[in-house]
Amino acid sequence: MAAGLTAAASLPRPPPVLARRRFCFAAGLFDTWPNALVTLLLVWLLIRIGIAMWDWAIVRGVWEAETAEQCARTGGMCWAFLADRWRLILFGPYPYAQQWRPALAMVLFALLLGASLSPALWAERRSRLALGVAWPVTIAAIAILLWGGVLGLPAVPSRLWGGLPLTMILASVGVSGAFVLAILLALGRRSDMPVIRAICAGFIEFFRGVPLVALLFLASVLFPYFVPPDWTMDVLLRAQIAFALFFAAYMAEAIRGGLQAIPRGQYAACESLGLTYWQAQRRIILPQALRTVIPSLVNIFIAAFKDTSLVVIISMIDLLGAANASTAEAKWWGLYIEPYLFVALIYLAICAVMSAYSRGLERRLGIGER
């Protein structure tokens, strides 16, 4: 044993990787010459871009102006335009005096969504029941705020909705409906019944093979020709259904991939325990499959949020459409960078939050770890 210990002591020690990583303020940035050169180049580019943006937005920015020509004299950012048109960009054609209602509706939705995504509230049964009650109550309150017609609120038809509230409604409701339908489609495509499997496969292939623009056009323009003349449906509801059906097809394929990744032993274990099909799916199979495909589902959620801008083809003014409409006034003609930059930052902030939450959820669930 002494000889073995002596031989082990004489073996060469591994390089001090941990010490080197502690010495560098960030591993992978300056550990090799190529990495150091790339890091310095990127830092130089970021500094140059930051200086240029500071000069354009702050140093030469125009804070008080009446027209686009006055802003163009300095060549800087026209803050006066945003100060004058930000409410139109955020709320679209919603009546100016009633814009506090969609603002309050967005705040309620953001608070409830943030509470629902907190793992601490899902740990106790009482908290889960409270969330189950809070969702329908909040949705009813949001509907009352937006539509009005009760509690002394003036009625506002859905054709006057626009801006960020319309984008949030289309994305959240469409994704929620698509997620439920996608689970059923994924299970149906893996069903042992040929008819169910064929119907689900045909649905998925059809909606994945048709552009979303075509579906929105079909829902808005051609749909009235296929129903009786006295039967009408709100254009917002038609667009919402088109969104849900389109993204359900994409989510279904992602979820089907997760189901196929589950080992056959899991199904055999469910059968040995005497679980029914739906019990096995709800308690054993689907939780594992959905956990596996979280990155793919979040990617689809982000794509759905950005694709809401396509409703402009059916005369609905979402966030991007409101940005386009904000420059329609004659005194602001020629300004395009400011509204598009403002809208881009909103899209970036919301998508970054979804991405950050997805990464945190993956770390918490240990996705990618064996």
Image (spheres, rainbow, N blue to C red):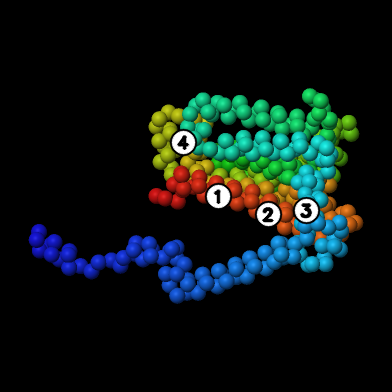
For residue 9, side relative to residue 228 (left or right): left
For label 2, the residue is 345
Marked residue nearer the N-terminal end (4 or 1) = 4
Residue occupying image coordinates x 76% and y 52%? 320
User: Hey, what amino acid is under mark 2?
Assistant: Leu
> In terms of sequence position, does the residue under pointer 1 or pointer 3 come before the other?
3
> Image quadrant for the N terminus?
bottom left
Q: Nearer the viewer, mark 2 or mark 3?
A: 3
In the image, taking residue 222 as reference, residue 114 lies left or right, namely left
Q: Mark 4, mark 1: which one is toward the viewer? A: 1
Q: Residue at x 9, y 61 (%)?
A: 2
Q: Could you classify mark 3 by the number of other residues whose Cα lies within 10 Å: few (under 14), some (14-19), or many (20 or more)?
A: some
Between marks 4 and 3 in the image, the one whose residue lies nearer the viewer? 3
Q: Which residue is mark 3?
A: 82
The answer to whether mark 2 and mark 3 are in CB contact below 8 A is no
What is the three-letter code of the residue carrying label 3? Leu
Q: Position of residue 241 (x, y in %)?
A: 73, 39
Residue situated in front as seen by the camera: 193 or 162 = 162
Residue 143: give x, y in percent of width and height: 74, 31
Whichever of callouts 4 and 3 sits on the residue coming sooner in the sequence is 3
Tag 4–tag 3 contact (CB < 8 Å): no
Task: Classify mark 1: helix, strand or loop.
Answer: helix
- Residue under label 4: 284
- Mark in front: 4 vs 2: 2
N-term-proximal mark, 2 vs 3: 3
Q: Is residue 67 above or below residue 167?
A: below
Task: Return the residue at label 1.
Answer: 356
Q: Nearer the viewer, residue 199 or 29?
A: 29
Q: Secondary structure at mark 3?
A: helix
